[in-house]
Amino acid sequence: MSSNDKNECLVEVKDLKQYFPIKTGFGKTVPLKAVDGVSFSIKPGETLGLVGESGCGKTTVGRSLLQLYKPTGGEVYFKGEKVTDQNIKALRKEMQMVFQDPYSSLNPRMTVEDIIGEPLDVHKLYSTKAERREKILELMELVGLNAEHATRYAHEFSGGQRQRIGIARALAVNPSFIVCDEPVSALDVSIQAQVINMFEDLQEKLGVAYLFIAHDLLVVRHISDRIAVMYLGKIVEIADADELNENPMHPYTESLLSAIPMPDPNLAKTRKRIILEGDVPSPMNLPSGCAFRTRCRYATEQCAKECPSLTDRGNGHFVSCFNK
Amino acid sequence: MSNENGMPKKNVLSAQIDLKKFDFATEEEKKQQDVMSESTTFFKDSMRRLRKNPLAMGSIVVLAVILLVIIFAPKIVPYGYSEIITVDGVRDKTAKNLAPFTYSKMEQQYMDKGGKVFPHIFGTDEQCRDYFIRVVYGTRVSLSVGLFASIIVLIIGVIYGSISGYAGGKVDLIMMRIVDIIYSLPDLLMVILLSVVLGETLGTAIKGTVFAKLGSNMLSLFIVFGLLYWVGMARLVRGQILTIKQNDYVLASKAIGTPAHRIIRTHILPNCLSVIIISVALQIPSAIFTESYLSFLGLGVQAPMPSLGSLANAARDGLTSYPYKLIFPAVTIVLIVLAFNLLGDGLRDALDPKLKK
Ligand SMILES: Nc1ncnc2c1ncn2[C@@H]1O[C@H](COP(=O)(O)OP(=O)(O)O)[C@@H](O)[C@H]1O
Ligand code: SF4
Ligand SMILES: [Mg+2]
């Protein structure tokens, strides 16, 4: 990639690997390849959707990217600068995270004020107590929380409200990039749309970029500019959201798309639903060659022997498959 | 096909909701929807539960009474713990081994002449000292030993345990093996050995300092506690931290860039506070117990300073003639230990309702 491209990117992930050592007894450890060579880039103000079945390593991508786990391999660049142990402290102000579980992600012993105030305290983003309070109330308003509830404890709020508190906490340092790890999948369907709309509004107002993780395409399709599809620790297809919708190439993406319910009953009738057979293989014991071959309709002999890599199919559409 | 509500007519078998059965919400009911329940802190909630526990409240009362007595009794009772009773400035040799609330011959004569003598509530001992004040001082010593020893255990245990639990991995492994080694030492034997060895070496070192009054034995007791008894606390805190660490709010705090010591202080320790409080409440009686048996073996506080254990030890000699001399310190030990244990149990139920079976 040319240096021009690099500067254009806000976040760039190159060949990120995260192996977890798993003890199998008798002092032996086997690496669990949760993330195995993932690369992508995100431009300022852009949303990259990341989808895949649960357990395929989406959360791990987000956490390794933010150096919450020490990556086994690969590099992360922020604004062209390599993220290291030395500069990560300063970069924490730029890159934030919203968590999947609104219950365990808020300390039950803290008030909303203190939860949102923590990043302000840590980075000393205020000079007086009054300024701190003002900032907290501003943030609460920004995410649609009632300012009167600032002194309440997190356990007194509903799931949707808790998620808003978590978003306010992430926004407190005024980041330019947020990893949203399935921020709506623990919420009621009726609230999911509200929260997703809020993410969109916030992006419009603040120009923040998202890595938006979800386990189904329906949620991601709406908010993303581009979408990456993950299967067992690898990205198998990445393309613009519309392009991926209309022209899915990887057999796995095909099946994910076919699982989305269609609003138009006539269209739904003509479409065939592709049901994947078999279970997801264990990430500790991956099949040889293409990891998807145990469930793939198009699998050939070559798929068992060689590993496909992401190849450009034009229009920024990358697919990792021999036969599609 | 539609009724007055504009709804299609309902099929008999349909589960469709019949709007006629519903009323509009009144303004009051609507308001109820917005207002959240009264905000209570975790602490308030626990104290409310504690107040409902009669055993724990009884223990608090017992401890409060004991505390008041040991604070104010020396101000009211005109005898000192090492003072030999005198009547009108003359040493009273007849005031030996008096039974509770009795007076010696000299005191009797003095009272007949119109003098006033403060009663010997628990009688006197074989050296003509007021026994009540000795038990009061003994309780003071035993309680402060219990408290100080628990504070030592608390500080070392919490710091060690939280570092080990938070760091995890190899650090945790090594730190916990050290704990295991200390844990596997026979503690009674170690306490006695250390007391004897330290007692001798410390004796010369502290001569002339404030510690001399306490005696080298007492100091070595604290050191023994500091060296041996923190391991239980360290294990407990580590275990708690390992579970609390799994919560996403700790990860969120890391993502914010919060330094480790602040994460431990603001997120982790408050969430294992209940376990720590309970364990301290249970540590105090165990320290008092250890002090008592060491004193009983003659390894406790320096004479003439009494402790409940040494008083009980001294009472062995005349056990058949003066059994009350054993009963008073023994009952005090039992009351204190029991009260702290019941209070600890009560606190556990109040702070950790999940643990209650
Ligand atoms: N801290 C960890 N230690 C060991 N294995 C882990 C750890 N975190 C995740 N894994 C494993 O890595 C795989 C991917 O997990 P995750 O990233 O949470 O998937 P997803 O978010 O897509 O559901 C899973 O098999 C999971 O068991
Ligand atoms: S490479 Fe082969 S097995 Fe893998 S997705 Fe393509 S066709 Fe299927
Ligand atoms: Mg996940």
Image (cartoon, grey):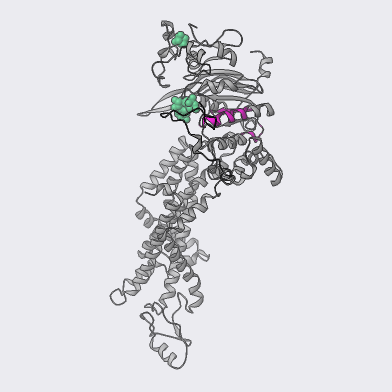
Can residue B343 be seen in the rendering of this structure?
Answer: yes
Q: Residue furthest left?
A: B320
Measured along the vertical axis of the image, is residue B349 above or below residue A157?
Answer: below
Residue B181 is left or right of residue B245, and the answer is left
Look at the image and give the residue range highlighted in magenta. A170-199
Measured along the vertical axis of the image, is residue B157 above or below residue B204?
Answer: above
Q: How many marks?
A: 0
Q: Nearer the viewer, residue B258 or B176?
A: B258
Image coords of residue A5 (percent x, y):
67, 15
Q: Nearer the viewer, residue B8 or B218?
A: B8
Image coords of residue A15 (percent x, y):
55, 18
Residue A284 is left or right of residue A44, and the answer is left
Can residue B340 be seen in the rendering of this structure?
Answer: no
Q: Is residue B252 magenta?
A: no
Q: Is residue A174 magenta?
A: yes
Q: Residue A197's image quarter?
A: top right
Q: Residue B92's image quarter?
A: bottom left
Query: In percent of the image, x 61 and y 36: which residue is there?
Result: A169
Q: Nearer the viewer, residue B181 or A240?
A: A240
Q: Nearer the viewer, residue B318 or B58?
A: B58
Image coords of residue B305 (percent x, y):
44, 70
Image coords of residue B177 (percent x, y):
41, 41
